[in-house]
Image: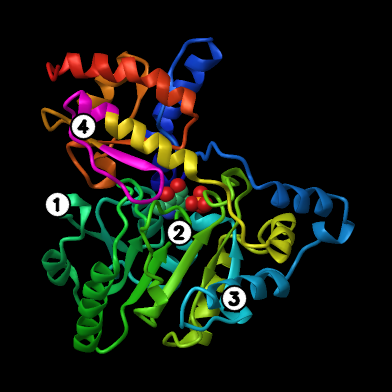
């Protein structure tokens, strides 16, 4: 007898993957399709990073097992990098190398929850895999809605926190909205967390899921969350910032001042061990040991975003104006995001309905595509606008 829950997770792919696979088949058949589904970066990995990887390939010791939590040198380099971002202090022994932010999140959720009454609060719109990870850890996701411009609904958040709340997840910049929560948002969030932690009598952790940390546009600045809240657990990934999503490399980092530093670190390491996540890919640890801090060039994402916003607005669609990440939200004219995605699909335009992101009535456009795809999509968006009588 199989585990029914796992069977169902394996059989029912996410909507994003479903559409992506559909587009792949069409492309293999030589059909033109504008695929805006997956957050697969289109810009190149920086040349220096590629060179480090090539060098590493030739070194036999690079391919050996490392410490379960990752090599000391890679962890030290990450701590040094985080120490430059603000006042919060990090050390190598507060960092664990992982197979991407997904593994980081799974490890953290499992480590900080122990009963099916335990709750993790998630701010909508959110990365749909959170629910899978939280429920697989045996806990419950509590979702908090958003207000205009995809800002968190703070009064709903106050009400959502209970004595069972173990943590809140913040994803800044946000997938799927591209929203950047500013300093005021973070201050308000931390005020609520401090108040609620005092009421409950123990800290509520703030899990900062940061795969898009480096991707912000114009003069936008990103608050460094551990400077605002000492009980922050960072879950990071190099997937987007170095265009390495298939290589599965990221980390968990906790600041020195966090409550229960030693036990929390051991608990996260233990929960990763329990599912076989030890010793993240060693070639990529070697890359981190030698990484100079220069990330991919994200300017193409900003251009794509601006081009698409101009196109959509000229066609009388409603969309948001993201300040970070590489996603854009388009509103379904009749409030039905699923139908919008289906209608677009018929035209060879693949966009993801945002219902599973907790944003009913919207669809997500991943703008991490080539400029050619953006150009080719314009007549298709025009047809979509006509299908809705917008023009
Ligand atoms: N968190 C968010 C918000 C994401 O968008 C993603 C991937 O798209 C992840 C976590 C998982 O990142 P990774 O693929 O590096 O594990």
Do the numbered discs 3 and 2 sit on residues whose CB atoms are within 8 Å? no
- Tell me the colour scheme of the image: rainbow
- Mark 1 residue's CB less than 8 Å from ligand 1: no
Mark 1 closeness class: few <14, some 14–19, many ≥20 residues within 10 Å: few
Task: Please tell me whether mark 4 sits on a helix, a strand or a loop.
Answer: helix
Q: Dot 1: what SS?
A: helix
Quarter occupied by the C terminus: top left
Work out whether 341 lies above or below 158: above
Principal secondary structure, stretch drawn in magenta? loop
Whether the residue under disc 3 has CB within 8 Å of ligand 1: no
Measured in 3D between alpha carbons, the distance from the residue under mark 1 to the one under mark 4, in whole angstroms, is 17 Å
Give the mark, 1 or 4, whose residue is nearer the N terminus: 1
Q: Left or right: where does residue 291 sit relative to residue 40?
A: right
Residue 372 in view, yes or no: yes
Magenta segment: does it hold 106? no
Q: Is residue 103 visible?
A: no
Q: CA distance from mark 4 to mark 3?
A: 42 Å
Numbered disc 2: secondary structure:
loop
Label 4 sits on residue: 337
First in residue order: circle 2 vs circle 1: 1
Per the image, the residue denoted by label 3 is 79
Q: Residue at x 61, y 70 (%)?
A: 78
Query: Which residue does the numbered mark 2 point to in the structure image?
Result: 213
Q: Quadrant of the rendered structure where residue 243 is? A: top right
- Mark 2–mark 1 Cα distance, whole angstroms, equals 22 Å
């Amino acid at each position: 007898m199989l585990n029914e829950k796992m069977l169902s997770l394996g059989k029912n792919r996410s909507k994003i993957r479903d559409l992506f696979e559909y587009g792949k088949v069409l492309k293999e058949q030589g059909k033109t399709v504008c695929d805006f589904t997956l957050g697969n970066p289109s810009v190149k990995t920086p040349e220096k990073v590629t060179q480090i990887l090539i060098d590493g390939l030739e070194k036999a010791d690079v391919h050996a097992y490392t410490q379960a939590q990752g090599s000391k040198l890679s962890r030290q380099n990450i701590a040094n990098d985080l120490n430059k971002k603000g006042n919060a202090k990090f050390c190598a022994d507060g960092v664990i190398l992982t197979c991407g932010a997904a593994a980081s999140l799974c490890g953290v959720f499992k480590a900080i929850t122990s009963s099916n009454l335990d709750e993790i609060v998630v701010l909508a719109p959110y990365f749909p895999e959170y629910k899978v990870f939280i429920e697989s850890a045996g806990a419950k996701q509590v979702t908090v809605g958003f207000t205009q411009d995809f800002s968190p609904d703070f009064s709903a958040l106050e009400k959502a926190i209970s004595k069972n709340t173990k943590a809140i997840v913040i994803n800044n910049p946000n997938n799927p909205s591209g929203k950047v929560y500013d300093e005021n948002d973070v201050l308000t969030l931390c005020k609520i967390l401090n108040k609620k932690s005092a009421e409950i009598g123990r800290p509520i952790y703030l899990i900062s899921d940061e795969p898009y940390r480096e991707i912000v546009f114009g003069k936008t600045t990103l608050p460094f969350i551990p400077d605002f809240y000492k009980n922050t657990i960072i879950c990071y990934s190099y997937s987007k910032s170095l265009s390495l999503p298939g290589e599965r490399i990221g980390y968990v980092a906790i600041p020195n001042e966090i409550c229960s530093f030693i036990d929390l670190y051991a608990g996260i390491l233990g929960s990763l061990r329990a599912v076989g996540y030890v010793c993240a890919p060693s070639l990529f640890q070697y890359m981190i040991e030698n990484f100079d801090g220069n990330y991919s060039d994200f300017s193409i994402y900003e251009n794509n975003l601006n081009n698409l916003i101009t196109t959509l607005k000229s066609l009388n669609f409603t969309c948001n104006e993201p300040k970070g990440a590489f996603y854009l939200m388009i509103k379904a004219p009749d409030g039905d995001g699923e139908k919008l995605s289906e209608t677009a699909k018929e035209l060879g335009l693949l966009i993801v309905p945002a219902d599973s992101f907790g944003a009913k009535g919207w669809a997500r456009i991943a703008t991490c595509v080539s400029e050619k795809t953006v150009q080719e999509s314009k007549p298709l968006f025009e047809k979509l606008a006509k299908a809705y009588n917008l023009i």
